[in-house]
Image: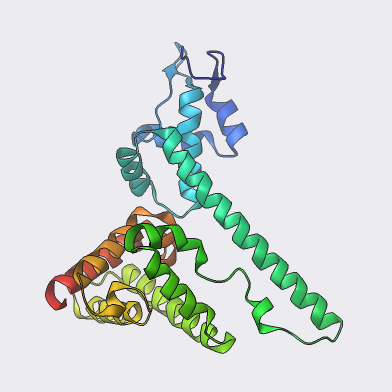
Amino acid sequence: MNDFPGTGGRDWSIQDVARIAGITSRTLRHYDDIGLLKPSRVGHNGYRYYDGAALLQLQRILLLRELGLGLPAIAEVFHRQADPVAALSRHLDWLGQEQQRLARQAESVRQTIETVEAGGQLMAEDMFEGFDHTQYKDEVEERWGKDAYATSDSWWRGMSAAEKRGWKSRAENLGRDWTAAAGSGVAADGPEAQELAARHVAWLKSIPGTPAAEGGGNIRGYVTGLADMYVEDPRFAANYGGAEGARFVRAALHSFAEKQL
């Protein structure tokens, strides 16, 4: 039996875990088969049982699945992040940021509905609250400094509503094209992917405050570092159809950086 905090040494049958977690016993058996989640013990009758540590592992799996990661990518995350509490803390921070952003979006939409119903004047500044890039503030400041974030943030807030929509549309189109290319089976170092990589770098250069925009420093390192982050951070991977798409983008950008930057 286990000594996982708060469980009192208890474990749960595979049927109980499936019911509590809202998944199937077949899914749990599959996780066992691929080595992602092993039961804490197997009874003499062949039934699988899971202790508190296994439930913690399952919670992480389900969280990462919700973020768009495939099972191979989740296995990679577990290999890199052995401390489950630290990993869950990171997930919790992200969920809190997403909760705040979605709350701002919901309030923005609610105000738009009320204004339209009342025949009032729509305010563009209010309509797009919660749709900006501030969710990445900590990552930008940690990697490239406070000045980089302040410059890009000032640029963003100085744009008109139409300019913001145009920029977002450009980013969304790029993400869709990357996802389509990754799913089509083209080579990451082939002409189609390399054209997308060139578009991607041009897009990065359009953001003031970044090393790409400044035109100096280690642009190759900046681009490849971002490409690695697209795979490492599920928030970014989701922009490219999930972990597999993000790995394709990373390979294409690394190839482009090596040849062109």
Give above or below for 261 relative to 107.
below
Image quadrant in which you'd find residue 184 = bottom left
Give above or below for 177 relative to 53.
below
Residue 12, horizontal then vertical, whole percent: 55, 21
For image coordinates 45% across by 34% down, the residue present is 85
Q: Could you tell whether 211 is left or right of 258 in the image? A: right
Residue 13, horizontal then vertical, whole percent: 54, 22
Image quadrant in which you'd find residue 224 = bottom left
Q: Residue furthest front?
A: 147
For image coordinates 48% across by 46% down, the residue present is 91
Image quadrant in which you'd find residue 237 = bottom left
Please name whichever residue, 201 or 17, is drawn nearer the observer in this view of the structure.
201
Residue 107, horizontal then vertical, whole percent: 72, 67
Residue 138, horizontal then vertical, whole percent: 44, 57
Asked if residue 187 shows in the view, the reply is no
The number of discs equals 0
Give above or below for 75 relative to 54.
below
Asked if residue 74 shows in the view, the reply is yes
Please name whichever residue, 73 or 187, is drawn nearer the observer in this view of the structure.
73
Q: Residue furthest right?
A: 118
For image coordinates 50% across by 86% down, the residue present is 166
For image coordinates 53% across by 45% down, the residue present is 92
Please name whichever residue, 148 or 237, is drawn nearer the observer in this view of the structure.
148
For the C terminus, the image quarter is bottom left
Please name whichever residue, 115 or 174, is drawn nearer the observer in this view of the structure.
115
Give above or below for 1 relative to 117.
above
> How was the colour assigned to the protein in this rendering?
rainbow
Q: Residue furthest left?
A: 259
